[in-house]
């Protein structure tokens, strides 16, 4: 696992050279007797103990994953993709999850949001606490398992009513509270809907009440709109792009409609040499903000439905926090939504709905254009009108990132978010994620192969191997002083600009078959320091420094309690 162009640049910077010192490579053996790692002195139990501020730090955890196990039931046997994964993500911090392909990083992300394909996969056990809500509540009642003789295969009898109820509960956190950037955007996007339709659905679902309120508060006939329009035309004649952008935003602000500024900017760009057409199109853009009474009633109806869904989501969250069903509240809210749809059934008639929702769809379209601008898409209007098959992999990835960031979630799970992007766009996307973390306090779980990206943006790192977390700690500490032989091997594979003649190390062997994984420590067949106990018993996670722990018998620190 090496570095590309971006990684090479970062590896020669301030973090990586200190991480891969001569004493921390795979060729330097740790000493078990004093719990000494390759690059530091022996740690006493007192020095290894959890710091006094750990309890306060734990209170800031937004996601706690404890002993998570996810299996896939195949004809060849049971694949133990996750086998006791435990880690914590803190509010406003970025946690990196690194490891080889096939070690279970993406399965971890899907298990947290309960998006594992079932069948063949099942989250078997564990605990996933998000802001105090148990996302796996009721898991043990969703399926029954029957071993098939001595074949190693298992028959799973699923209770689909309970599985459906769990998926309904998860709708309270997916998208708004926990958002995911998927690794394969071509599979995540619907090929029969335009980009605008798919992003508009996300905006309406998670920010619908705010959008409708802002649309109803628009003042297209305010006294300052005409003056702002004249200034926009003057800026268009001057031809300065930044001036046009500023004038367009002022035009939207005068009408109390920010999306109007985006629309006006692209109108001016498209008709910069045709002033009469420009005036006509700007007039049409103001017309969409003049809401007729029938449209206003339709928008208020939509707002009430979104509010009811929001209250239903609060009930689902309350159920997961209290681990107790609130059946009466759920039924009452569903009954209210059903009655509202029944008494306004005519809003669902195709012709009526198409006419009444037109102002809302236009508002959503220009908000989508603004989102696409934020991820550096050069022609956002054309892309918003296009379909997934018309875009390249890199552009689709940016669309997926825009969709995930649009709801400003509490937790962002980014599964290889920069894989299909060039170096320049990578930097812009990482800056967007940093801005979201700073501005909103979003926590980020970053899944990646690129150690340089982890060194640049992560606060904490979890190293994963064969379905288990084998080492975790602060990013600078782990890069400076890797403890587990596997983590040492990963860092030793990074090229060094200050040592151009240094031969890169590699880890022998390959990731084990998770149907029949090795006993004891799963890394022992590839580990140069394997001892007899490594082949028999699973090493516990021990504390070897402040917030730094490792699962390896080469170290004998206090056993971590969580």
Image: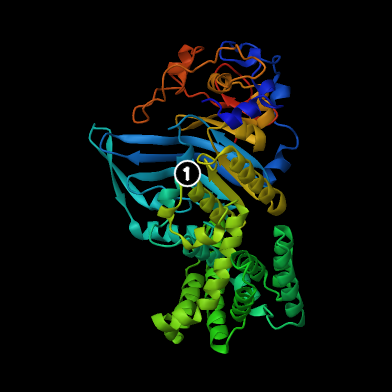
Foreground of the two, 183 or 411: 183
Foreground of the two, 330 or 388: 388
Farthest residue to the bottom: give it.
293
Q: Is residue 335 above or below residue 16?
A: below
Instruction: Mark yes or no: residue 483 visible.
Output: yes
Q: Is residue 43 above or below residue 114?
A: above
Farthest residue to the front: give it.
273
Taking the spot 70% from the left edge, 59% from the top edge, the residue there is 241
Foreground of the two, 343 or 426: 426
Circle 1 Cα neighbour tier, 10 Å, few/some/many (<14 / 14–19 / ≥20) = many
Foreground of the two, 188 or 176: 188
Quadrant placement of the C terminus:
top right
Taking the spot 60% from the left edge, 75% from the top edge, the residue there is 277
Image x and y of residue 77, in percent: 29, 34
Q: Is residue 448 above or below residue 40?
A: below
Q: How is the image coloured?
A: rainbow
Taking the spot 48% from the left edge, 47% from the top edge, the residue there is 182
Would residue 151 appear left or right of 50 to someone viewing this image?
A: left
Image x and y of residue 195, in percent: 48, 60
To which quarter of the image does residue 515 belong? top left
What residue is pinned by disc 1? 183
Instruction: Mark yes or no: residue 38 visible.
Output: no
């Amino acid at each position: 696992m090496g570095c590309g162009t971006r990684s090479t640049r970062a590896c020669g910077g301030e973090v990586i050279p200190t991480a891969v010192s001569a004493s921390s490579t795979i060729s330097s053996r740790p000493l078990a007797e004093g719990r000494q790692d390759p690059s530091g002195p022996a740690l006493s139990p007192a020095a290894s103990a959890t710091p006094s501020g750990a309890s306060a730090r734990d209170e800031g955890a937004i996601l706690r994953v404890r002993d998570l196990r996810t299996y896939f039931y195949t004809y060849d046997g049971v694949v133990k993709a996750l086998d006791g994964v435990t880690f914590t993500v803190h509010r406003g911090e970025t946690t990196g999850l690194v490891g080889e392909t096939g070690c279970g990083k993406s399965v971890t992300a899907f298990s947290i949001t309960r998006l594992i394909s079932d069948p063949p996969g099942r989250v078997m056990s564990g605990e996933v606490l998000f802001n105090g809500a148990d996302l796996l509540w009721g898991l043990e009642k969703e399926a029954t398992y029957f071993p098939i003789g001595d074949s190693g295969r298992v028959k799973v009898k699923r209770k689909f009513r309970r599985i459906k109820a769990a998926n309904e509960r998860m709708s309270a956190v997916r998208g708004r509270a926990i958002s995911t950037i998927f690794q394969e955007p071509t599979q995540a996007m619907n090929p029969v809907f335009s980009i605008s339709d798919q992003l508009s659905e996300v905006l309406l679902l998670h920010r619908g009440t705010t959008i409708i309120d802002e649309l109803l508060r628009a003042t297209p006939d305010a006294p300052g709109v005409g003056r702002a329009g004249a200034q926009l035309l003057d800026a268009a004649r001057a031809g300065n792009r930044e001036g046009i952008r500023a004038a367009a935003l002022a035009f939207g602000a005068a009408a109390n409609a920010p999306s109007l500024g985006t629309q006006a900017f692209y109108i001016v760009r498209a008709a910069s040499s045709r002033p009469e057409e420009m005036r006509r199109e700007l007039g049409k853009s103001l017309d969409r903000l003049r809401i007729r009474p029938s449209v206003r009633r339709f928008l208020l109806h939509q707002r009430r439905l979104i509010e009811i869904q929001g209250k239903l989501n609060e009930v689902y969250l309350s159920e997961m926090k209290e681990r107790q069903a609130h059946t009466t509240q759920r039924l009452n809210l569903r009954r209210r939504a059903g009655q509202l749809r029944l008494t306004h059934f005519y809003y669902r008639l195709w012709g009526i709905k198409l006419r009444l929702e037109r102002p809302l769809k236009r508002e959503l379209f220009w908000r989508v254009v603004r989102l696409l601008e934020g991820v550096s898409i050069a022609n956002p209007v054309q892309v918003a009108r296009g379909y997934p098959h018309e875009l390249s992999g890199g552009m689709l990835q940016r669309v997926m990132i825009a969709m995930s960031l649009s709801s400003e979630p509490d937790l962002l799970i980014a599964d290889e978010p920069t894989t299909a992007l060039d170096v320049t766009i990578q930097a812009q996307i990482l800056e967007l994620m940093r801005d979201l973390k700073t501005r909103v306090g979003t926590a980020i779980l970053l899944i990646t192969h690129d150690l340089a990206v982890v060194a640049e943006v992560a606060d904490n790192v979890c190293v994963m191997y064969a379905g288990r977390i084998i080492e975790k700690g602060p990013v600078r500490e782990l890069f400076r002083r890797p403890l587990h032989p596997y983590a040492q091997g990963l860092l030793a594979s990074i090229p060094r600009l200050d040592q151009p003649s240094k031969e890169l190390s590699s880890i022998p062997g390959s990731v084990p078959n998770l149907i029949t994984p090795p006993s004891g420590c799963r890394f022992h067949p590839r580990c140069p320091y394997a001892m007899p106990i490594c082949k028999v018993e699973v090493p516990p996670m021990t504390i070897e420094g402040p917030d730094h722990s490792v699962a390896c018998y080469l170290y004998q620190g206090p056993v971590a309690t969580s």
